[in-house]
């Protein structure tokens, strides 16, 4: 097996010299298989980025949330003691991601079109699904909180750990509004979210995540938002309430005692935008005053926004100009949006962590623009185009993550999922 394929696992030693010929033939065969699957393994990280990771990287985050400080962190400090010290932090990170994937797949199975809970009759999603989704979401949240504790406890912290943690978070962000949409339904008359507003909901939640990491690109510090733990805990409560009351009962409770559920969401969206922008401006101002801002010119500070704005323009205009294709299969669009967002924001994370300059136009925008041009401008079967692009977006992101993790493992001489050094 080639060294590229062995990066994520320890290569077994030869058992005996008499088997060397057989082993060599097997390795050559495996090399051909893996190269056929992965097509190419061009390094995704530049030499400048690799040097930045090993010489300039320093983890810096500030969490002032009262909920985090007085509840979550003590809980995680206690919870992490139940994990053996041989468990790698990245295993916990990835396990949390798997929990959310199971959440997503369960709800997609029962409610692919976000219409299962549109009527006020008997619920179409079994109650046990909501309880299981709540437990898995809580497990994901707490695993995400404990992985850093485990890294410090075992002395295995590394740039790869932060990148995997926040990179996986980026891919979880788009799943959060999508899973919640199964609670709301898509019938506004029944308290649901009208599907034409679904892209705005996706933008609102991913925007906050993007702004936090753009802020770190400039200040060198990740200011963890107060709303993160509050939002995660609220989501778990919502899923539990959907299990006890059914989604219809939950929406009726809000309509009778507070306000219609969908109106509450519509109110929270602009508040989220304003809050994120306001806090970011404040933190940037403090960074300039203390002389710790990384970029001196406005153009360099705003450079990452070029790709982000283009991405959102192309993604959000598709539902506007290809409304029929979007409304007939909205979930496919959400998947495409989510994986493309993750691909772009992970590249920003790499730049911020390695102290390098970001690309003006990020590579994931190329297939996105081609797909947009075919569907929106040329009107060539938009429904087919979005499905094909979604597959491309998923595969390109997975491939990018695979190669980046391998590049870092090779450079730092570590294994991704075990607390050991690699054998050179």
Image (cartoon, rainbow, N blue to C red):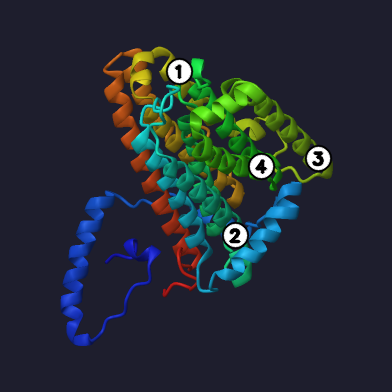
Q: Position of residue 55 (x, y in %)?
A: 61, 60
Q: Rounded to the nearest whole Å, what is the CA distance between mark 1 and mark 3?
A: 36 Å
Are there few (<14), some (14-19), or many (20+) residues within 10 Å of tag 2?
many
Q: Nearer the viewer, residue 264 or 228?
A: 264
**Residue at mark 2:** 146
Q: Earlier in the sequence, mark 2 or mark 4?
A: 2
Q: Nearer the viewer, residue 190 or 309?
A: 190
Q: Is residue 17 shown above or below 240?
A: below
Residue 340 appears at what percent x and percent y? 44, 35
4 vs 1, front mark: 4
Observer-side mark, 2 or 4, equals: 4
Q: CA distance from mark 2 to mark 1?
A: 39 Å
Identify residue for label 3: 286
Q: Residues within 10 Å of mark 3 (few under 14, many from 20)?
A: some
Residue located 27% across and 49% down the image: 39
Q: Is residue 413 visible?
A: yes
Residue nearest the viewer, comparing 179 with 124: 124
- Name the residue tied to disc 1: 317
Q: Residues within 10 Å of mark 4 (few under 14, many from 20)?
A: few
Q: Nearer the viewer, mark 1 or mark 3?
A: 1
Quadrant of the frame with the C terminus: bottom left
Q: Earlier in the sequence, mark 1 or mark 3?
A: 3
Marks 2 & 1, CB-CB < 8 Å contact: no
Q: Is residue 180 above or below residue 52?
A: above
Q: Judge the density around disc 1: few (<14), some (14-19), many (≥20) Cα neighbours within 10 Å.
A: some
Disc 2 is placed on an element classified as helix
Q: Mark 4 and mark 1: span between their CA atoms? A: 32 Å
Q: Which residue is mark 4?
A: 230
x and y, in percent, of residue 68 in the image: 71, 51
């Amino acid at each position: 097996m080639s060294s590229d394929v062995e990066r994520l696992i320890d290569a077994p030693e030869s058992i005996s010299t008499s088997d060397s010929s057989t082993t060599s033939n097997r390795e050559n065969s495996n090399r051909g298989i893996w190269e056929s699957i992965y097509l190419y393994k061009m390094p995704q990280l530049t030499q400048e980025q690799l040097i930045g990771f090993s010489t300039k990287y320093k983890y810096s985050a500030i969490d002032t949330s009262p909920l985090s400080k007085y509840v979550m962190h003590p809980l995680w400090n206690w919870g992490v003691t139940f994990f053996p010290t041989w468990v790698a932090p990245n295993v916990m990170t990835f396990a949390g991601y798997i929990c959310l994937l199971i959440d997503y797949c369960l709800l997609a199975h029962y409610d692919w079109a976000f219409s299962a809970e549109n009527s006020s009759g008997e619920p179409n999603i079994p109650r046990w699904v909501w309880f299981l989704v709540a437990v898995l979401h809580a497990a994901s949240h707490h695993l995400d909180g404990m992985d850093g504790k485990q890294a410090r406890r075992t002395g295995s912290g590394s740039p790869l750990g932060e990148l995997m943690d926040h990179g996986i978070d980026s891919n979880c962000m788009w799943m959060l509004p999508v899973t919640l949409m199964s609670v709301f339904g898509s019938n506004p008359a029944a308290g649901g979210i009208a599907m034409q507003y679904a892209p705005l909901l996706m933008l609102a939640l991913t925007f906050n995540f993007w702004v936090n990491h753009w802020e770190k690109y400039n200040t060198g510090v990740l200011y963890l938002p107060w709303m993160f733990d509050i939002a995660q805990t609220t989501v778990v409560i919502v899923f539990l309430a959907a299990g006890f009351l059914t989604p219809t009962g939950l929406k009726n409770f809000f309509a009778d005692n507070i306000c219609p559920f969908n109106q509450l969401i519509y109110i929270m969206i602009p508040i989220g935008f304003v809050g994120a922008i306001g806090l970011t401006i404040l933190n940037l101002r403090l960074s300039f005053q203390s002389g710790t801002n990384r970029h001196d010119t406005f153009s360099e500070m705003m450079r990452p926004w070029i790709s982000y704005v283009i991405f959102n323009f192309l993604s959000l205009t598709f539902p506007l100009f290809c409304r029929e294709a979007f409304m007939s299969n909205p979930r496919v669009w959400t998947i495409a949006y989510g994986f493309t967002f993750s691909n772009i924001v992970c590249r920003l994370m790499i730049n911020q962590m390695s102290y390098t300059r970001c690309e003006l136009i990020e590579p994931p925008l190329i297939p996105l623009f081609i797909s947009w041009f075919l569907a929106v401008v040329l009107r060539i079967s938009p429904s087919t185009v979005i499905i094909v692009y979604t597959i491309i977006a998923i595969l390109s992101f997975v491939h990018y993550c695979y190669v980046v993790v391998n590049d870092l493992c090779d450079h730092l001489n570590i294994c991704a999922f075990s607390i050991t050094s690699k054998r050179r």
